Amino acid sequence: MTSTITRTAPPHDPPPPRSPWRGNHDFRALWTGDAVSQVGSQITGVVLPLLVLTTMNGSGTDIGLLQACYTAPFVLLPLLAGVWLERRARLPVLVSTDLIRLVLVLAVPLLALTGALDLWHVFLVAALGGAATVLHDIAASAYLPRVVAADQLPAANSMLATNQAVGNTAGPGVAGWAAGAFGPAGALVFDALSYLVSASALLLVRRREEPPAPEPRASVRRQITDGLGAVLGQPVIRRVVIHAGIYNAGYALLGVAFLIHFVRELGQGSTRYGLVMVVGGLGAATGALLTPAVLRRFGFGRTFTLVLPFSTLSYLLLPGAGGGTAGLVRCAVAFFLGSAGAAGGSVIAMTLRQRLTPDRLLARMTASYRLIAFGSLSVGSTAAGLLVDRFGARAVLWCAPLVLVGSAVPVLTRTVRRLDRLSQ
């Protein structure tokens, strides 16, 4: 069955679909595992840079390289991962990658306990953990449409995006408390436990998944080409992925510069940094929860246009922030509004991809999309570290929002703006 785009809004708003939460044990298990894993992942995302910045006295270049090590697999692995996943059941991959990340994260506090932890160990854990995350995220995105009905995908994606938002909220708070109580390395123990809980929840899924049948006589090169074609050959997905790639590069610039400027240059400290990330997570949760209702009211194109000012212009508040409570509040407001817009955009983009792509191409499409959208994180993080050391963190904080604003251009075209609803 092929997907079509209807550009004329229906005369009456369709009734909201049944919640994927009701009567769907497998979705609840998937959601629970994802919720716990997201909290733990955010702990790692906060603690590893803090470990390098505070305990190891790392430079801006070190922070940028650490982020680049984590995001490099998003460039190197997605295409082959997509082909590999097309031939396998996705649930065992989800469980295995949780267990792999558990072992990797536990290695850091164990090495620190023995006094053997070095900077290259942290880089290696980040790179291998990033590779496991690539496999996990592609498998999860391709697995979701097999757990819920097509008309439930916006709500299901919203709930998973809310998990990420809650992780952004709870994770930094837990990270700040644990880092203060046990040190940055000790805080990673909480992350390791989260992966164990996530794997256990996924093992509760009852439906036995059959591996998808690969296309007959299709070479690996042909399958990769088909996956890229599912992204670049579909006008809406093509514009969204270009937007995402530019946006993520800008956000990588912003993330590295803000950490160094806020913690080191303004002297706000890791606890207040965690608080800003908590507020940002609350904004992301708000955006993710509101998006399905807004989509039903305004359609995909107009909703996308609505969230863009929040996800881009809000971060112009950061460079002028000073120290003290006033600076803290200003940064928190920027991250609340920006994260709300970004989370809403993520729900829209994920639902569009899943509805416009045939099931047999989902894993390969997701892999190709992530290659373009998230591969730019590695470039942005590396550039951020070098630019911060050369020009200073505040200067980079002025440049990063301009990149975010520029990312809106591809999705402000008529093709996306006039997209009202999808039908299958």
Image (cartoon, helix red, strand yellow):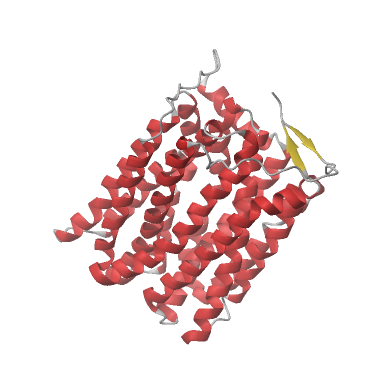
Instruction: Give above or below for 5 relative to 248.
Output: above
Closer-to-camera residue (3/291):
291
Query: Looking at the picture, how far across and down is residue 134, in whole percent?
Result: 45, 42
Asked if residue 323 can be seen in this view, the reply is no
For the view shown, which residue lies furthest in the top direction? 217
Q: Is residue 203 left or right of residue 76?
A: left
For the N terminus, give its image quadrant: top right
**Res 103 → quadrant:** top left
What residue is drawn where x is 34% and y is 41%?
199
Query: Looking at the picture, how far across and down is residue 64, in whole percent?
Result: 43, 61
Q: Is residue 181 left or right of residue 23?
A: left
What residue is drawn where x is 40% and y is 43%?
131
Instruction: Give above or below for 302 relative to 74.
Output: below
What residue is drawn where x is 55% and y is 37%?
366
For the C terminus, give its image quadrant: top right
Query: Looking at the picture, how far across and down is residue 364, in whole percent?
Result: 55, 31
Number of numbered discs visible in the structure rendering: 0
For the view shown, which residue lies furthest in the left direction? 114
Asked if residue 28 can be seen in this view, the reply is yes
Q: Is residue 197 left or right of residue 205?
A: left
Query: Looking at the picture, how far across and down is residue 287, in whole percent?
Result: 60, 59
What residue is drawn where x is 54% and y is 43%?
370
**Res 100 → quadrant:** top left
Closer-to-camera residue (166/343):
166
